[in-house]
Image (cartoon, helix red, strand yellow):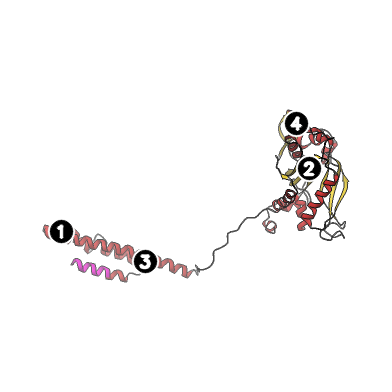
Amino acid sequence: MELDEIKQRALAHLDDVSDLLALEAWRVAYLGKKSPLSQALRSLGSLPLEERRRLGAQANQIKELLEKALLEKEAALKAAEVAQTLGQEGVDVTLPGRRPTLGRLHPTTQMVRAICQVFVTLGFQVVEGPEVEWDYYNFEALNIPPDHPARDMWDTLWIDSPERGDKGAMLLRTHTSPMQIRVMERTRPPVRVVVPGKCYRYEATDATHESMFYQIEGLAVDKGITFAHLKGTIGEFARRLFGGERKIRFRCDYFPFVEPGVEVAVDCFACNGAGCRLCGNTGWLEIMGAGMVHPGVLEQVGYDPKVYTGFAFGLGPERVAMLRHGIDDIRLFYSNDLRFLRQF
Ligand code: DAH
């Protein structure tokens, strides 16, 4: 066969090829070992030199051309195949993409931030402390000596570790109050801090008790701080968090590190104090413990209680979130149920 004829025929055939299987057959027929082109190349050897050069060059040119045509055809067939599958599966490439699921802040985190933000605007600094504590900070320096019955107020998770001389045994902090001591140890008045963080109790859990929960501690110490400052600060906090009309109520309570100690309640924001399901018909919601820092605590950190006075408070952000959102079980916060978490 004439080389030219081989080329014409191959290209004409390639036009008819409509799938990859037929394309492979075409490749074998026109570029395979037994193809006329290969045969022609092989027979060149028996030709005179002049002829061999001319035909050889032509044959190689045709081979290159056919190989290039093969690749182009293959790419075109594959593209057509993809387009067809997309069409069959009904993929509409003009549809907008799927939204990735975004995470969000845990309701406790949101509440902790909202509460700290209020105190920051009132001039408090946010500090954090260790969750693993020494007996000294968690109890002793807070006016709770060993064997004092007040220790029963906190069911404690002790850690099996060697005692550190003057600091005593190790435990998971039962409240954020130990940070009062740590902050005062390393600074001189004026002190104004809030301390958010996790606390741990050796406790059977129920709707209002968890073995791990958050607290936010507050401490203000300076010359001339009185109970009026405590009242004013907490009142302002309650109004900023729960709304402009809130009233607060103080009732005597006992905490070893304050004197006097109080339990603070706000009038119920759901019923404005009239009495409803949320406040258990009392009209009041208890939100924190507070008091004037005990002189013994100030002495413990080397502050002269005749010169300096202060107030402290401690509140549970989960409890505040429960009141605010009408959540009836604290265990929901840490059971990782997305149906709960996605609501916030
Ligand atoms: N630490 C106390 C608790 O866990 C809460 C508390 C009460 C903190 C009175 C205070 C305070 O700072 O003055 O029960």
Q: Quadrant of ligand 1?
A: top right
Along the polypeptide, which appears first: circle 4 or circle 1? 1
* Residue corresponding to mark 3: 76
In this view, 81 is above or below 105? below
In magenta, the rendered stretch is 1-11
Q: Quadrant of the N terminus?
A: bottom left
* Residue 295 found in image quarter: top right
Q: What is the x, y in percent for residue 133?
A: 72, 37
In the picture, the disc for residue 220 is 2
Q: What is the x, y in percent for residue 244?
A: 80, 58
* Circle 1 Cα neighbour tier, 10 Å, few/some/many (<14 / 14–19 / ≥20): few
Q: Real-space Cα distance between discs 4 and 3? A: 80 Å
Left or right of residue 291: residue 187: left
In the picture, the disc for residue 168 is 4
Kind of residue at badge 1: Arg
Kindly report which numbered mark, 2 or 3, lies closer to the viewer in this rendering: 2
Q: How would you classify the magenta stretch by its main secondary structure?
A: helix
Left or right of residue 50: residue 193: right
Along the polypeptide, which appears first: circle 2 or circle 1? 1
Kind of residue at badge 3: Ala
Kindly report which numbered mark, 4 or 3, lies closer to the viewer in this rendering: 4
